[in-house]
Image (tube, rainbow, N blue to C red):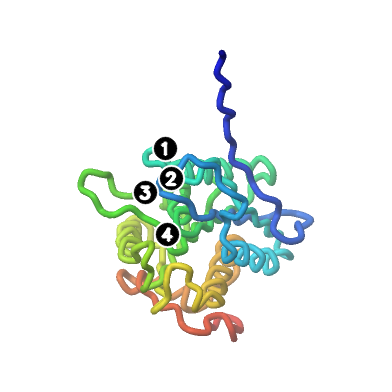
Amino acid sequence: MSQQATPLRSPRLGRVVGPEPSAVSGVVLLLPSGDEVSERRPTPMMAAASLRALGRRLARTGHDEGLAAHVVHYRYRGWNGGEAHLAHDASWAADEVVRRYGDVPVCLAGVDMGGRAALHAGGHAAVNSVLAIAPWLPEDDVAVPPEPVKQLVGRQVMIVHGTNDQRTDPELSFRLAARAKKANRDICRFEVHSDGHGLHQHRDEVHALAEDFVMGTLFGRVFARPVEDALAAPPPLGLRMPLASGFGRFRSGRGG
């Protein structure tokens, strides 16, 4: 009896989040979490509610600027070691943006394992910025090459991490940011004090910070003062910038 070939899986972009702009001039690709090892197919619910909420917020804010937000649907749930499936799917998604919309700037915005995928795929020619929220990063191991950072040169990068994260180690994202800062001054990292992996306690502030970064990098809006300060500050100050309670709530002009 002949064996049936396993069908090839393909990544895909979800529908545009919110109303589609009449002309697209910038794209944010939302990269959900995943597993360290798994060849199972992701479920439609893989994109966490918080990531979808961020996408809706960005779509509303950026609609008049021509922002299109898409969730990336991976082929597999897992990173899967050297296969780095999630990173390859993020790069594919950037290629797909170019095919659909032409030469527009792209921000990769990922959470957890999606944050790692965003950092890895940040070297794509269409990508001008990377936002990694509570990124999952592997433990330091002398037998394993360190996470790459050279691909981030020329990109604006923001990492956001809760100090009480029990799932992804915030110290690992600090170490990666410190290495990246040596080659790329346009990187900053915010710490959300007392918050955990999901950043539920300060979700409004985290989403306001993400909005400020995405709109600034894709469309040239002036960053809020804390973001400007974090990007300009030498390490470790700009890599351990505390996210103030109420960030974005009363912003006017350049205020925080």
The amino acid on which the numbered mark 3 sits, given as a three-letter code, is Lys
Q: Say which amino acid is labelled 1.
A: Glu
Which one is closest to the eye, mark 2 or mark 3? Answer: 2
The amino acid beneath tag 4 is: Pro
The type of residue carrying mark 2 is Trp
- Tell me, for residue 150, which label it has, or none: 3
Distance from disc 2 to disc 4, alpha carbons, whole Å, reads: 13 Å
Single out the mark in the foreground, 3 or 1. 1
The residue that mark 1 highlights is: 83
Considering the image in quadrants, where does the N terminus appear?
Answer: top right
Foreground label between 3 and 4: 4
Q: Earlier in the sequence, mark 3 or mark 1?
A: 1
**Left or right relative to 229: residue 75:** right
Which residue in the protein does label 2 denote? 79
Q: Earlier in the sequence, mark 1 or mark 4?
A: 1
**Residue furthest toward the right?**
22
- The mark found on residue 135 in the picture is 4
Q: Is residue 221 visible?
A: yes
Q: Position of residue 82 (x, y in %)?
A: 37, 38
Specify few, some or many for label 2: CA neighbours under 10 Å numbering under 14, 14-19, or 20 or more: many
Q: Are marks 2 and 1 in contact (CB under 8 Å)?
A: yes
Q: Nearer the viewer, residue 160 or 220?
A: 160
Q: Earlier in the sequence, mark 2 or mark 3?
A: 2
Up/down of 219 relative to 34, above or below: below
Against 22, residue 165 (above or below) is below
Q: Residue at x 43, y 42 (%)?
A: 84
- Residue nearest the observer in this picture, 119 or 217: 119
Residue 51 numbered mark, or none: none
Q: CA distance from mark 3 to mark 1?
A: 19 Å
